[in-house]
Each structure stands twice: as structure tokens, then as C-alpha cells.
Amino acid sequence: MRIIVVGTGYVGLVTGACFAESGVTVTCVDNNAEKIQQLKNGNIPIYEPGLESIVKRNVEKKRLRFTTVLTDCLDDSEVIFIAVGTPPGEDGSADLKHVLDVAHEIGRSMTHHMVVVTKSTVPVGTSEKIREAIRGELDRRKARLDFDVASNPEFLKEGAAVDDFLKPERIVIGVDNEKSTEVMRRLYMPFVLNNHPILFMDIASAEITKYAANAMLASRISFMNEIANLCDILGADINHVRKGIGSDSRIGSKFLYAGTGYGGSCFPKDVKALIKTARDNGYELHVVTATEMANEYQKNIIFKKISKHFGNDLKNKIIAVWGLSFKPKTDDIREASSISLISKLLSAGAKVKAYDPAAMEETRKVLGESIEYAVDPYEAARYADALALMTEWSEFHLPDFSVLNSIMNSRVIFDGRNIYDPAELRKHGFTYFGIGRR
Ligand code: NAD
């Protein structure tokens, strides 16, 4: 079987490489020539555990190749996945420009029947827009070709993307006929040998399932953050509360961690887009709107705590920031809380020294030389007036506190992910601030 994946970002590259791993011949297409050249040279443009080896292996076996030219591979492929970005537009809606550009390009160059599958996260009705765009181009060139559209939202998590794709908990596929159902079933069969389900449904339901999943997860985070903030006020500990409620099987223990608010390339934009879709259809999603408001507040929580600690005077204070990516095991800094914190610290006149195991290059693209990039966590902390832990990378879990004690200018830690034991830190002479930790 031959397939095409358009877009070689976090989703497209993982999708292409993992399908190739199952024996399918995959062409990955991207209009970013630099990215494609990097991939052709054997370099992986993103940090994602396990991805490099799987890409290399499948390139060597000639099951995976890269191009900037869609027409190079259209001839003999049965399925084409659209996995390009859907960034937020100014009004919060998903910007479908890239998705529809690809649809037009497919319509302009298609030579035979194909199933056109949307993997990008898109609002209800997008598959119909894709169908119209392709049909319009086919009509323009008087081509009498048949094609199908399908929706296959992606649920992988950055940092565990390869594993999530190879061993998914479920696969959601929106289809409107038997033919595309069968093609998609065949393609995904190797990934459900663990008996996890492929859930076939209508296209609109598949499109909304992705947004509903992200909004539900985001709301759990915002809920816990609000309870943590209340714990701060009332002198309770959110970690006890988390265990207390998480052991109720109706609630479950996952995704109950308080922190500095959700970030990344998905939750913030998908929550906004879902609110906008509802409003466009005359409906107000109150819970989802509150989730977003709570998150906006939470993204400033560490700045507020730092500012308060220093009596609202951060001029020339040196703040060390550990962790820049929006979560561990990725170099993705889109909507990361660390970036909001750093921007606020700089505006308040503070100096920032940062360290992240993978995301320094990406951060430099956004913040340039406005901050200092340290070679390791201790260098970041040297002479600092406070340390803010923003991403819970494993290497930050057990630092040598006696070394930190000796190199920091003043011993204050703001633990944005609640990974440290306040009592232990106090023993080492630190003033500790967590999120909802008394
Ligand atoms: P990304 O920004 O990392 O990658 C998108 C890629 O598409 C880029 O390489 C870009 O050059 C390419 N592209 C844009 N327009 C193109 C065109 N016309 N032709 C060819 N290539 C084009 O994005 P991503 O994080 O991989 O996300 C892609 C989609 O998947 C989004 O809709 C996102 O919401 C969704 N999604 C992302 C994740 C995630 O964790 N990143 C998880 C699930 C779903």
C-alpha cells in the first residue's frame, strides 16, 4: 500500500514514519524546503523520543521518503493524509488556510481515486470544505475523477508521540461510505493488534471528538489549578486533595496535577476554536469558556508569586528558569508558560538565565538574546535571586540542593510543577513556593 502524508511537523512526521514501520510505502510532503532538505540529510527537525531511529530505519528500507512536490507521489497512492497546521485565527477560530491550500493542490493534481483524510485538528464542516475545494479544482480541469474524504483526528502526545501512534488507545475515523471504511481499516489494522478499538463514526462526530477530548482534558487541568489556588489561600495541600479525589474511580488519578496552566500547540488553540464554533452556531459553552479564563489566570501565577515575594520590585533581580518547553520530552515552546513568565519578568526589569535540555534553540528563535542561555541547570542558577521550575524534565527532579544553596544569591524556589518536597527544601535552607502547597 502507498500513502502520502502532507505536513511533516510533530503529527505528520510521526504519522508517516509509523505507517512506514508497518510496511506501508510513505511519501512525506512539506512546503518547507529547508525541513525537507534536513530530513533528506538524515536530520530530524524536531525533538521527539524514538523518532530518529524509526525515520532512519524506514528511509534505509526505502519505505519512507521526503519531497516538497506533491505531484511527485500522487500517481500511485491510495490515501493522502492532510497533517498541516491549523493555527488560531485572530478571532480564535481554527485557521484552515493550510488545510485548504493542500486540498486545492490535491484537486489540481489528482490522477486517480484516493481517500483524502484530515488528520489536522479541524472544526466540524471542514471535510465538506475540503471536498468542495477538490471538486472545484477537478471541475475546472474537467477531470471526471472520484474521491472520498474522511476524518481521522490524531490523539498522540508530544514527548510520547511514537509510542502513542504505534500503540493507540483508540483510533477515531469519520467516514461516509464502505469503501473508505475498508481502506482505513486495512491501514490501521497493524496498530490495533492489542485489541484497542478503531471507532468508525460519521465525519462530523469524528471532527468534534478531537475538540471534546482536548477541552475535557484542559478543563481537568483548570479545575485542579483553581482548587490549588484555593488551597494556597486556605492552607491546604493540593497533593493530598489530588490523591483524595483521584482514588475515586469515577474521577481517576490522571491529569489531576496543578501547575502553571496548560500550553502547547493544541489545548489553547483547540479550546478557543471550540468556543468559537459554538458561538458561530448560537451556543455558549460555559464550562469551556471558564476553562480558558482559569488558564489565562494560571499562566501568570508564578510571576505573581515571584513579584509578591520581591515586594513588586524585580528591577535587576536575576531569575533562573528551569524548563522552557511546554512539557517535558519535547522542544515545543508554543504557548509555554515559561515564555509568558519570562516576558513578564523582562518587562518588570528582571534578568533571566534559562536552561532546558531540548528547547533552547526554539526559545532563542522567539526570545533572541533577551535572556541568557545557560549550559546546565546549575549555571542558570548561579548568582540567581530565585529559581523558577517551569517544566518537570526528569533531570530537574533531584538536583543537589547543597550545591544550589552555595551558588544562588538568595535561596528561593518557585516550583511551578510541584515536584519538590517543601519540607526537604526548607531543610536545605530554601524558601519554597509551590502551587497549592501551603
Ligand atoms: P506543525 O506546525 O509541527 O507542522 C505542520 C507542518 O505543515 C509544517 O512542517 C508546515 O511546513 C507544513 N505545511 C503547512 N502548509 C503546508 C502546505 N500547504 N503543504 C505542505 N506542507 C505544509 O504542526 P503539528 O503540531 O504537527 O500539528 C498539525 C495538526 O495536527 C494541527 O492541526 C494540530 O492541531 C494537530 N495535532 C497536533 C498534535 C501535537 O501534539 N502537535 C496532536 C494532535 C493533533
Image (cartoon, helix red, strand yellow):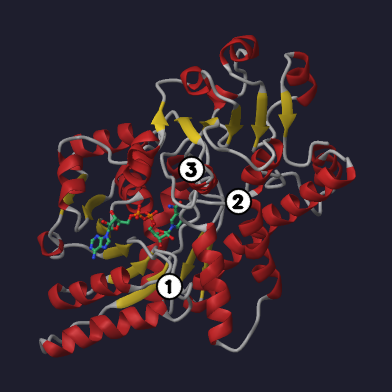
Residue 141, relative to residue 250: is it above or below? below
Which element type, helix, strand or loop, lies under badge 1?
Answer: loop
Count of all numbered marks drawn on residues in the image: 3
Q: Which of pointers 3 and 2 indicates the residue nearer the eye?
A: 3
Q: Which of pointers 1 and 3 indicates the residue nearer the eye?
A: 3
Kind of residue indicated by mark 2: Lys
Q: Residue at x 70, y 41 (%)?
A: 308
Residue 371, relative to residue 71: is it above or below? above
Asked where in the image residue 267 lies, by quadrant, the reply is bottom right
Give the residue pinned by disc 3: 346
- Identify the disc placed on residue 31: none
Kind of residue indicated by mark 1: Glu
Q: CA distance from mark 3 to mark 2?
A: 16 Å
- In what quadrant of the picture does the C terminus appear? top right
Closer to the N terminus: mark 1 or mark 3?
Answer: 1
Which element type, helix, strand or loop, lies under badge 2?
Answer: loop
* Left or right for 21, reference 203: left
Q: Position of residue 177 (x, y in %)?
A: 41, 79
Closer to the N terminus: mark 3 or mark 2?
Answer: 2
Give the residue pinned by disc 1: 90
Q: In this rendered view, identify the residue nearer to me: 93 or 65.
A: 93
Q: Position of residue 330 (x, y in %)?
A: 44, 39
Q: CA distance from mark 1 to mark 2?
A: 20 Å
- Identify the disc placed on residue 299: 2
Q: Quadrant of ligand 1?
A: bottom left
